[in-house]
Image (cartoon, rainbow, N blue to C red):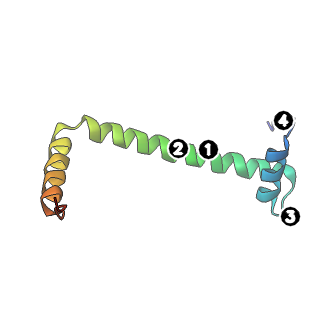
Amino acid sequence: MPRSLHVRLDDTSAAALEVVRAGEMTDSDAVRTALREAAARRRVRSALREEVRLVAADEGDRKEMRIVREQLAELAPRSPD
């Protein structure tokens, strides 16, 4: 069943709605689009956070990253003293 929602927009939100509408969508279509896009971005960020958590928890990966950092540090030009 469709759900109806009433929202009061401040000036910034009203301007953002106009950007999403781009003159071609109804307010309802624009809000639905913005909600779907925002949800997709949050899912991606959540998946990235989980991936980072898994990598950080993997001792083998951390050891490998440490080795790579040390190797890169050896390749970096030395600053003149």
Residue 28 horizontal/vertical position (percent): 84, 49
Q: Which residue is mark 1?
A: 39
Percent across and percent down for residue 21 are 81, 58
Q: Looking at the picture, which amino acid does disc 3 mark?
A: Gly
For discs 2 and 3, the disc positioned in front in the rendered view: 3
Tell whether label 2 touches label 1 (CB within 8 Å): yes
Alpha carbon separation for disc pair 2 and 4: 23 Å
* Mark 1 and mark 3: Cα distance apart in space: 23 Å
- Find the distance from the CA under tag 1 to the CA under tag 2: 6 Å
Residue at image point 80% right, 45% down: 13
Tell me which amino acid carries mark 1: Ala
Quarter-of-image position of residue 56: top left
The mark found on residue 11 in the picture is none
Q: Secondary structure at mark 3?
A: loop
Amino acid type shown at disc 4: Leu
Please report the residue visible at 75 percent of the width from the left and 48 percent of the height from the top. Answer: 32
Name the residue tied to disc 2. Answer: 43
Indicate which disc, 2 or 4, sits on the residue closer to the N terminus: 4
For the point 87% across and 36% down, the residue is 8
Of callouts 2 and 3, which one flags the residue occurring earlier in the amino acid sequence? 3
Q: Is residue 53 left or right of residue 40?
A: left
Label 4 residue SS: loop
Q: Residues within 10 Å of mark 4 (few under 14, many from 20)?
A: few
Q: Amino acid at mark 2?
A: Arg
The structure residue drawn at horizontal position 84% and vertical position 40%, both measured from the top left corner, is 10
Label located before the other in sequence (4 or 3): 4
53 sits left or right of 35 in the view: left
Q: Nearer the viewer, residue 58 or 73?
A: 73
Q: In the rendered image, which residue does mark 3 sit on?
A: 23
Residue topped by disc 4: 5
